Image: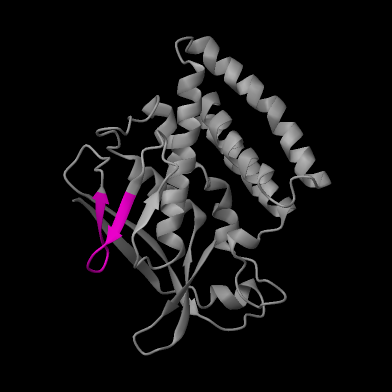
Amino acid sequence: MIVRPHQAPSGESLLFLIPQSVHAALSGDLASHWGNGGFLPLVHPEVVWPAIFHHDDGWIPTDNAPPIDPETKRPVSFLDSPPADSHAIWTKSIQGAARISPFAQYLIAEHFMMLREQSHSADSEAGRTFLSKYDELCESWRDRWEERHPACHEEDVQRAIRQLRFFDWFSLWLCLADRTEPHTFEETPQDVPLTITPQEEGVFVTEPWPWTVQDVHVAVGGWLVPDRNYDDTDDLLREMNDWRRLHWRFVPK
């Protein structure tokens, strides 16, 4: 779950809870119609696009019954998920991608392996076990994909991984906080800097323009709940009845 601070017009402190699967769907929406100018289109979009869209499906059961942090008494953010819990959730996402393609499993597993490698728990027993397991499986999935698609070269594979990781971060950047200052994404799939400049509420001027359509309108949904101590998951679920949406519109300079 993404746990985003929110203040009501009355001044009341609230939490905006955005399910991880909703954030991933936003990643897919941002990836749609991508590929203008110096920004290349998705590699094998019939596989890479659904992999981006569904890469966090493993979170759905957890986000439907969010755990409560025993110390803060607040919903557990995905950023604070214990490694063992994250590994179990990531495994569900990877397994679920089998319905798309072995290449989708490969991409999602590589994404999660990179997240673990960059974390403080990379050298823990759980971290090493996770990385070792999926290192072997990734080799198998990639071999199966390349048997069917011998023209898919290493450059394409690496670009596909970068595309998934970029759209994941782009979506998270939008979901984690209200953005009021210009931001430049330096690590885009082709390393072409992309600058997003907020204008009036929810509108972002985008330079250079990376999409093949004239403007892009995206949204996510989530629950607004009071920012208070929660006894347990059932206590939180009783408050999860106010579903709201956040909207963003991207326009060229």
Query: Residue at 48% of width from left, 51% of height from top?
Result: 21
What secondary structure do most residues of the magenta stretch adopt? strand
The residue positioned farthest toward the right in the image shown:
125
Q: Is residue 215 left or right of residue 128?
A: left
Residue 100 seen in this snapshot: no
The answer to if 203 sits in the magenta stretch is yes
Q: Residue 246 versus residue 189: which sits nearer the camera?
A: 189
Q: How is the image coloured?
A: one colour
Residue 183 appears in which quarter of the rendering? bottom left
Image height check: is 71 above or below 190? Answer: below
- Whether 200 is among the magenta residues is yes
Residue 152 in the image: x percent, y percent?
46, 15
Region in magenta: 195-206
Looking at the image, residue 180 lies above or below residue 174 = below
| Near-viewer residue (17 or 210) | 210
Residue at horizontal 25 percent and vertical 69 percent from the top: 201
Q: Does residue 23 appear anywhere in the picture?
A: yes
Name, please, the residue furthest toward the bottom: 10
Q: Residue at x 51, y 78 (%)?
A: 239
- Residue 160 appears at what percent x and percent y? 46, 30
Left or right: residue 107 versus residue 179 is: right
The one nearer the camera, 50 or 190, is 190
Left-right relation of 113 to 192: right
Quadrant in which the N terminus appears = bottom right
Q: Position of residue 17 (x, y in %)?
A: 48, 67
Q: Quadrant of residue 107?
A: top right
Residue 52 drawn at (x, y percent) = 45, 39
Look at the picture and state if 92 lies above or below 142: below
Q: What residue lies at 64% left-to-right and 39% top-to-bottom?
A: 113
